[in-house]
Image: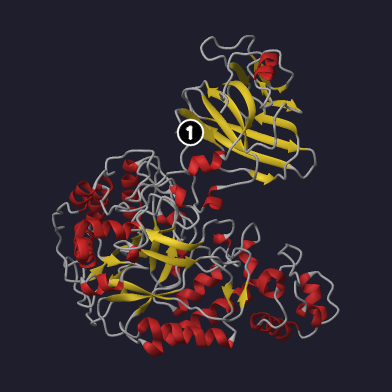
Amino acid sequence: MMQRFATGLCLALCLSACEATPSTSLSDPKATLTLNGVQRAEHPDAGDGLLRYTFTPSTEPSIVLEQPALDANRGAIALRMQNMMGWAVTLVVDIQGSRPDQKLHAVIGVPAGPAQTLLVPLHPTSPRAEGMQAAPPMPYENAGERELVATTVEGQWKGGAIERLRISMPSPQAAQVVAFGRLHGEPGDALRSAYTGLVDVYGQYTRATWPEKIADDKALREGARQALAAAGGNQDKYGGTLAGATLKATGWFRTERRDGRWTLVTPEGHAFFSLGVNAVTPDGGRTYVQGREWMFQGLPAAKGEWTPFYGTGDNRNAEASSTQGIGYNHGQWFDFYAANLRRIDGDGWRNAWMQRTATRLRAWGFNTVGNWSDDILAKGQHLPYTRSINIGGVYGNVSSGYDYWGRMPDPFDPRFVAAAEAAVANATKDVRDDPWLLGYFADNELAWAGQGPDGRWGLAQGTLRGESRSDAKQRFIAVLKAKYGDVGKLAQAWGMPLASWDALNATGFQMPSPNEAHPAIVDDASAWLRTYADEYFRVVTEALHRHDPHHLFLGGRFAVNTPEAVASCAKYCDVISFNSYTDVPQHGVDTAAAGKLGKPVLITEFHFGSDDRGPFGKGVVSVWNEQQRGEAYARYVEAAAKDPSIVGAHWFQYTDQPVTGRLLDGENAHIGLVGITDIPFQSFTDAVRAANARALER
């Protein structure tokens, strides 16, 4: 293979020496370029032959090469470069082909440090296409070379000549110096190289180290089995506080508002602030391996001892935007976390995990096992827990325009009513008489609203966009007919032509966006949103009360919501639950407004992630490092405990997500209390323990 770099040579010499690989050199002071807001040095640096370019403060300073001498049939373009600043800079690379629709666009963060090669694949790509949400850190060492691969490239490319290459910097506020050298077409698959060998036999990221990373089975066992001191506290057996007034004991968890403050109450009659953890399960390390075995080092054989840790799945869903563009989303998976538990404790690993995990949760100050957790753990270890009512089946749905996990169920469809009845019966059948059950959630993060400035009205607009056979659409039209009688009155109120009521029946009918000239649009949309939510929560509530008259209905775990949906939840549920990924809960939930609805608030998901412990993703709310994760947790829980409307907060999640992405949607974040090796992140759990102890004293 020919030498990759020819530094310090002029353009003519480079083209002559690299005849097999057409190239140009930005280190030639005489190279023909168009410089916009960029100043070029007169001579290359003596050390590495790179030429310095100064991007001056302006809107978008750029370097433009017309018809660069590059082989566009190669896998990527490669540019030798160095960020000369003491901080990271952002470069934008735009590649224009011979046709207007042939273009690629990449935004690259370039860290400070030694010279490296920037590689931009000549095809659209993203981490999602590789089966994960976040890409591996860049640059990385490849055969002794420092390479920075653009892991996200947008646009389309079907080959052909490169007509124009533009390198720009978005609005620098001060002069930024970047040195460039040879630019050429790079053979091979740069992206494949960047993703090769990312994960070791334990499921750990291979290209970094951190305090909890282990090298062998002995370290794995020692790290996971570290003893924990029991948490102190004056609590009843359910985790309720024995300090303060004794409340009415009913034998079940319930809610009470006293002196302006809401609280949960244990079956024994003591105030209970629910500090929970979601996804406490021994099956949390599953990631697809089929078709991308090259990403893993030492992947165990699928036959023999490790067969129980393999399985197959299919997470394709055309109606959910969460899965769009995700590669490697079906086929064979391997569970690294469960396999590590087997390495730690042998054949009895499940029971050992349950005992160890229950001990940890109590020691860290948690008193609730949250959603999507292991049922046997919660019930067998005597910890308060929640149960999810997952309403599945074939029934109508409505698009609100958000549809992250899929469309909204149509609660007016009789098939949904039957599905809800079946789901409630299944969820309650073995727990209705269990006093340790805190309560039930219905579904999770439904698409109650759309996106953008008119997002609040997305469900109303989506209802009328549906097909005429939609039960929700027919109910909405019936409501409008009852209100207006004559279609002309509706047309006048909405400011649009309507020849007959049949016009609303058309698939794709576009309800007008709210505007000041026609206030009836807002009134009608708002009324429909409330009607829709009332039907959903009524159906589930009535089914739940038929099957379990004892336990709390904890709401629907709102991610996006509308005031109408929240008010309806307050009417039918015992608790209003929110998944609130913000610095403090009050910045994601209007707890004061919720409190006025006469029901308490439970925060059912929050977390803080960083990328210094293996997985590349930082979660929904990111911080810089592990120390800041603990500080952020303490700040969030303190704000929750002080709020008179909030009765608890549940962390998401117990275990770090797999480096190469979880099955559901490729999430791969460091957000756990423990790693994929079941070793706790001690500095973080120490901070969690202290924060939880303070919260339970509220």
Q: Quadrant of residue 570?
A: bottom left
Q: Tally the marks.
A: 1
Q: Is residue 82 left or right of residue 245?
A: right
* Residue occupying image coordinates x 73% and y 21%: 33
The amino acid sitting under disc 1 is Pro
Q: Quadrant of residue 334?
A: bottom left
Horizontal and vertical percent for residue 349?
A: 22, 64
Asked which secondary structure carries label 1, the reply is loop
Which residue has dot 1 on it?
139
Q: Residue furthest bottom?
A: 546
Residue 648 is at least partly visible in this image: no
Quarter of the figure with the C terminus: bottom left
Quarter of the figure with the N terminus: top right
- In this view, the residue in front, 279 or 640, is 279
Horizontal and vertical percent for residue 15?
A: 69, 19
* Residue occupying image coordinates x 52% and y 20%: 84
Estimate how packed mark 1 is, as few (under 14), some (14 to 19) or many (20 or more) residues with alpha carbons within 10 Å. some
Horizontal and vertical percent for residue 144?
A: 44, 28
Residue 10 is at least partly visible in this image: yes
- In this view, the residue in front, 524 or 607, is 607
* Residue occupying image coordinates x 34% and y 61%: 649
- In this view, the residue in front, 227 or 371, is 227
Q: Is residue 418 left or right of residue 648?
A: right
Horizontal and vertical percent for residue 585?
A: 41, 56
> Vertically, is 616 above or below 453?
above
Q: Quadrant of residue 109?
A: top right
> Vertically, is 612 above or below 260?
above
- In this view, the residue in front, 268 or 559, is 559
> Vertically, is 210 above or below 523?
above
Q: How is the image coloured?
A: secondary structure
